[in-house]
Image (cartoon, grey):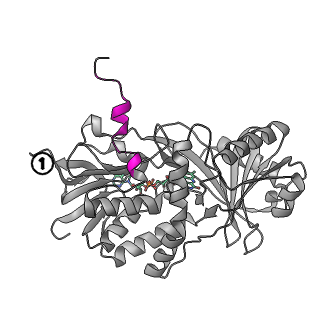
Amino acid sequence: MAGSADVVVAGGGVIGLSAAWLSAEEGISVRVVDPAPGRGAAWVAGGMLAPVAEATFGEEALVGLFLDAAARWPAFAARLTEATGMETGFQQCGTVAVALDASDRAEIDQLLDFRHELGLDTSRLSSSECRSLVPGLSPAIRGGALMPGEQQVDNRAVVLALVEACTRAGVDLVAERVASVSVGRDGAADGVVTQGGTLIPAGTVVLAAGAETPRIGGVPAAVVPPVRPVKGHVVRLQTAGTHQAFDHIVRGLVHGHHCYLVPRADGSVVLGATSEERGYETTVRAGAVHMLLDDARLLLPGIDEWELLECIAGLRPGSPDNAPFVGPTAVPNLVLATGHYRNGFLLTPITAEAVAAYLATGSIPPPLDAFPADRHLAAAPPAGA
Ligand SMILES: Cc1cc2nc3c(=O)[nH]c(=O)nc-3n(C[C@H](O)[C@H](O)[C@H](O)COP(=O)(O)OP(=O)(O)OC[C@H]3O[C@@H](n4cnc5c(N)ncnc54)[C@H](O)[C@@H]3O)c2cc1C
């Protein structure tokens, strides 16, 4: 490891790697410190880029951010493939939301009205329209909704391509765990200290360790982002064929439970996901897997014949308002890029571009500037109140 870099990124998930890559392409020298790049939540995720399906009551402020984020994906995916020669699995496949019973149907209809009010591109589907769009759906389906503009990527292909893009752009990947941020006598961040005690100096420190970000030491309590781990189980299945099982992402509402099935080009399907507040643990639990499979087979009875490839769990970096923390903090030279919760893939290009722009110009561009990284301090009651 030679000399000090302009920037050290603590955490090489989809956010840290993409921010490092685009910053390096701007001529900034970057080091990413991560014991297992790409193996956090990004390895587990469904890879849906779903601004419409994620638009929900009370989160109107996020919809514009999500739509802007989604619009950047076609160019970002093309750039990543051009830089590496590697595919990302990017496709505009659309989403079909389906309801199993009458109250599921009512919930989908309510969301449909809300999304129409926001001007989003979605339309009501009858039961037979759902079944003609998604072969194999159960005749019990009560109908649903189409979101034709939704996209997906292959999450694992994306992080593998980002590692390659970083390497080609000259990013130094250091396989160590960050224990703490180093803060100099002037109160400014000047590097990170690894678990082994090595100081890795840098002009700017970017904290991008996903759900683990608050566990990195050396950061004043008020600056630690209020990020919490939200556990999600996923089941990976393989259909009999080697081509995409169905065209659209399927989002199911099954007696009030949410699940999704994301069909990949190679015939595999990602079935997700639970949402559990259990702290920092990623044990795969039988009950969670059972529930996902049980719900999914009510929608698509044919999955009983599919091969069970993998059961895995990961930790989403949840934030109190479901928006990310991207930008400078009260500690000079300490920048946050975390808290992307359920939409870290959707928000990857917009976050990476914002971090690279901040490092080059000193300001976070719109629309992410509407979500300052220290906004939780404004929301907190004054001390002693
Ligand atoms: C079940 C599930 C399904 C999901 N589905 C989707 C989806 O369909 N679409 C979507 O947009 N998003 C989805 N997400 C969310 C998305 O995966 C996350 O928002 C995204 O991965 C966050 O990226 P990140 O880089 O901040 O964190 P991560 O991907 O978790 O990466 C964090 C990295 O930091 C490293 N790290 C941790 N601690 C340290 C340390 N002390 N020092 C150095 N490195 C450290 C880890 O090794 C890891 O590589 C899903 C998440 C889950 C769990």
Numbered circles on residues, count: 1
> Residue, x 41% and y 75% (percent of image)?
164
Please say whether residue 319 is one of the residues in the magenta stretch. Answer: no
In this view of the protein, which residue sits in the foreground, 65 or 385? Answer: 65
- Is 280 situated above or below 313? above
Q: Which residue is mark 1?
A: 184
**Can see residue 330?**
yes
Q: Position of residue 263 (x, y in %)?
A: 69, 64
Quarter in which the N terminus is drawn:
bottom left
Relative placement, left or right, of 326 versus 244 is: left
Looking at the picture, which amino acid does disc 1 mark? Gly
> In the orientation shown, which residue stands out farthest toward the top?
385
Look at the image and give the residue range highlighted in magenta. Answer: 369-383
In which quarter of the view is residue 128 placed?
A: bottom right
Instruction: Please report the residue visible at 39 percent of the width from the left and 38 percent of the height from the top.
Output: 226
- Taking 304 as reference, is 8 left or right? left
Percent coordinates x, y for residue 329 in the rendering: 27, 45
